[in-house]
Image (tube, rainbow, N blue to C red):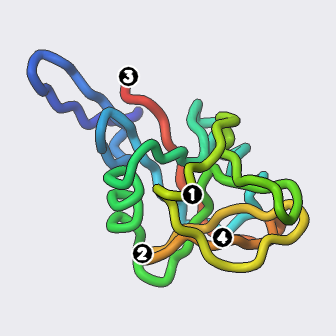
Amino acid sequence: MTAVIGLNFWGNNYVCPNDSLLNQGKCYRFSASSKTWNESQHDCARLQAYLPVTQNSKELEFIQKSLKSGQPSWIGLYSTSPGKQWMWINEYFVEQKNFSMTGPVDNMSCAVITRNQVYFEDCDSKFNGICQRDVV
């Protein structure tokens, strides 16, 4: 049995599973198990979700504030080679003026988020995952 959290704003019903947090019409589930970027992406797909794609600084701040200290997590941002532009998993490019990232970019680098930064890591490293989906 799955419980749900529902909120009603201005006639709209927003519902997320009980193990998720609601923000700006999206549900976020924070995993406590360390996996590679691809493994985390597959875990999200099984939940009909995806690694987070942030559209604005408020979404990014929400994710950062929701993370537990010392638990960096994957987001849906990657680059396939050094010097290539960063791309979200929905195939949109990152606007550098809205997004600050640190660290070296190697072949197939993926983005990790902490409470105060976004940085690059080898996609085969293991971190917690975050799954994002639209509310139902």
Q: CA distance from mark 4 to mark 1?
A: 24 Å
Lower sequence index among marks 4 and 1:
1
Could one spot residue 45 in this view of the protein? Answer: no
Which residue is most to the left? 10
Q: Secondary structure at mark 1?
A: helix
Q: Residues within 10 Å of mark 3 (few under 14, many from 20)?
A: few
Q: Which residue is mark 4?
A: 127
Percent x, y for residue 91?
70, 36
Lower sequence index among marks 3 and 4:
4
Could one spot residue 92 in this view of the protein? Answer: yes
Q: Nearer the viewer, mark 4 or mark 1?
A: 1
Q: Secondary structure at mark 2?
A: loop
Q: Amino acid at mark 4?
A: Phe
Residue 136 got which mark?
3
Q: Which residue is mark 2?
A: 115
Q: CA distance from mark 4 to mark 2?
A: 14 Å
Q: Describe residue 106's horizontal placement relative to residue 13 as left or right.
A: right
Lower sequence index among marks 4 and 2:
2
Q: Secondary structure at mark 3?
A: loop
At a point 30% along the width and 44% down the height, the residue shown is 23
Q: CA distance from mark 2 to mark 3?
A: 28 Å
Q: Nearer the viewer, mark 2 or mark 3?
A: 2
